[in-house]
Image (spheres, rainbow, N blue to C red):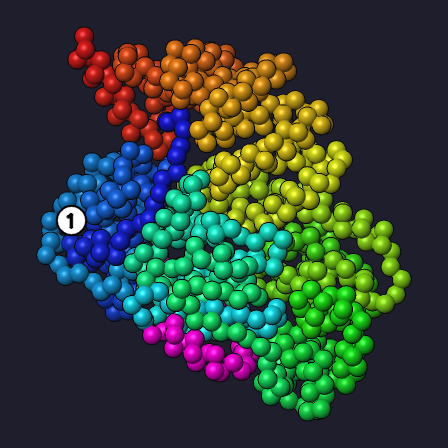
Amino acid sequence: MVSTEIGALMAGPSVATVKRLFAVSGNRCAFPGCALPLVDEASGKVTGRICHIKADSPGGPRYDPEQHNRERHGFANLVLMCPLHHDVIDSDVETYTVERLLEIKARHEARYAGGSQPSDDVARQFLLPVHQLPADLADFTGREGEVGELVALLGEGAAGATISSIGGMGGVGKTALAVHVARRVVERYPDGQIVVEMGGTSERPLTPVEAMGQVVHAFQPETRLPDDPNEVAAFYHTTLEGCKVLLLLDNAANSAQVRPLVVPAGCGLVVTSRHNISLPGLRHFDLDALPVEEACALLQTIVGEGRATDEELGTIVGLCGRLPLALRVAGDFLVVHPDWSAGEYARELANEWERLRRLKHEDLDVGAALGLSAAQLVRERADLAARWQMLAVFPAPFERAAVAAVWGVQEGEARDGLSELAARSLVLYEREGGVYRLHDLMRLVAEDAFGYGGGERDAEGERARLGEAGVRHAAYYLEVGRRANALYMQGGEHVLEGLWLFDGAWPHLWAAYGRMRGRGGQGAAQWTSAFPGRVLYVLNLRLPPRDQIPILEAAAAAAREIGDRRGEGAHLGNLGVAYAALGQVRRAIEYHEQALAIDREIGDRRGEGADLGNLGLAYADLGEVRRAIEYHEQALAIAREIGDRRGEALRCWNLGLLYEDSDPARAAELMQVCVDYEREIGHPDAAADAERVRGLSDKAGKGR
């Protein structure tokens, strides 16, 4: 057991390394007695897996923190096996030690030495390509010129990176065109197609570093990125180097946001933005509204033959500004409401010009279409309109259970309401993920839903309804965050499940944090105080210490406001940990001392022990070994007093580290306590730590 964990930088094995491994595999699993193929000879499909002898991430089986990244993903640390035996060796680390696996690897490769290498395409299949492209629109219409040029550009396989941007106003179909083209050239980029929503129209667009993080995590979900932006950039480029990946940066804010994300040679980059993007070597496509003929053809395709006359189609196209999003909303409305004539619908569109000016914000015509749908919902189903308004609290895709929580109903009732809203194109349903979402402009319309109905408004009631929705939304996603944290802490197969759950919840948690922090009142303070503790471990993995600090400061202030001394002490202690991670050890000590004073005041012996242990680590970082030992010994005494086995093991290990050079016998004695506990609970570090203790014992014996 180690006193701290530092996220390793893991770029993964290279294609050349995989080819070399396969050449000595005989196309057979290396596990003794297994003859399963790694690549199916009939279909060419890869079924084998790359196995790391020493794990590729902290906490993994046989992980060696001192191993260099190049060695970790190098030929000597890798072996190819079938999925079954890959899981076997990782679940039984006591049997399949590093030495045992090296022996298995050596025997297998000696037997099949001299084999031929596979093609690059086969080797890349071992590297788990990531495919994130959404489905293409079945009724995509028009843009033939742009489609042809983009397909030729992205599919030609130029020596350098292929960079293109699609610009134009909101609702003009930038993303639809990008996805349509990307689907046409997917074979050109076999290593993956990654989509990043850049948030260019939001109040807080993604930073380049955050976008890089999303790309890296698409390939390596367990990777903890460094705090230094330059190191993140280097890791991003290392991840993509030598690969054939298509990156779609959707809804970019400006050139400065995109420039650091330019991909290396062999990759493709497509950027969509409402703003012109300028990058070296970029080919720009500026989209305008559809020509009248293409707009009418699109609307005709959506509504079907015989639903409207040519004149009615032309009128609706004109009122929608020939924008694809507005045309789709209008067409879908006519499809799901056969009792409305196209002429009647066109007259309703014509009555919305005043409301258009109220929603002018870059998307006048899209606002007209969306506002019209809102007005009809208010007239026909005011109760459902009230619930739709509550969905404005969701900043990202959301699941049915979340809606049930925000509406305060059972899931069946939430399902029925969402189904009708989806039929009206007021929410979008993503079949693959089973989630719903509001378009960014539709969310603005939803928040002011009753502003489109033309009748009297209960403004106070609407504010109260939205406020209650925000509170329920925050409570729901705080519980989701807690579950994600608990799954991650279970380890093993649950780690990725926990991270996946947290990553989906994070946009909601961040929005809830901003909402609750500024809300005021005891309930909001309780939420703000509880937030970082409920997601402590996943937050620590996903958020750099510098970004954790303001959250912890707000939490400590909230705990102080509601008189929660225990919570305040916990937040102060975590602030100390964050500052220590940034190298500001003296400031970390100040926070740990404040936390220690509170825990002693309230009699929290477990918290007191943690504070003393953190002070020991801090003084060790300063090189004040004697003082560090004093704090660790006090922490050890408390752990033994309260029967905290885990705490005792950790304190013994950290004390042992301080005695390694001066008194190896004492160090071995202390660290053996930790090893015994690790063996008892089946900790993956037990074998490696035991070997370290044996080395200390040998050193002590030689010194006598």
Counting every numbered tag in the picture gives 1
- The residue located at (25%, 57%) in the rendering is 15
* The residue positioned farthest toward the top in the image shown: 704
Residue 499, compared with residue 188, is above or below; it is above
Q: Is residue 148 magenta?
A: yes
Q: Is residue 16 left or right of residue 392?
A: left
- The residue located at (38%, 59%) in the rendering is 263
Depth order, front residue of 188/591: 591
- Position in image of residue 270 (x %, y %): 45, 66
- Position in image of residue 115 (x %, y %): 13, 59
- The residue located at (69%, 86%) in the rendering is 313
What segment is highlighted magenta in the picture?
129-156
Residue 185, compared with residue 18, is above or below; it is below
Q: Quadrant of the C terminus?
A: top left
Residue 30, compared with residue 242, is above or below; it is above
Depth order, front residue of 531/606: 531
- Position in image of residue 459 (x %, y %): 85, 54
- The amino acid sitting under disc 1 is His
- Position in image of residue 67 (x %, y %): 27, 36
- Secondary element under disc 1, as helix, strand or loop, is helix
Write down the quadrant of residue 602 in the picture: top right
Depth order, front residue of 559/673: 559
Residue underneath mark 1: 108
Q: Is residue 594 left or right of residue 412?
A: left
Q: Is residue 509 visible?
A: yes
* The residue positioned farthest toward the right in the image shown: 456
- The residue located at (66%, 66%) in the rendering is 362
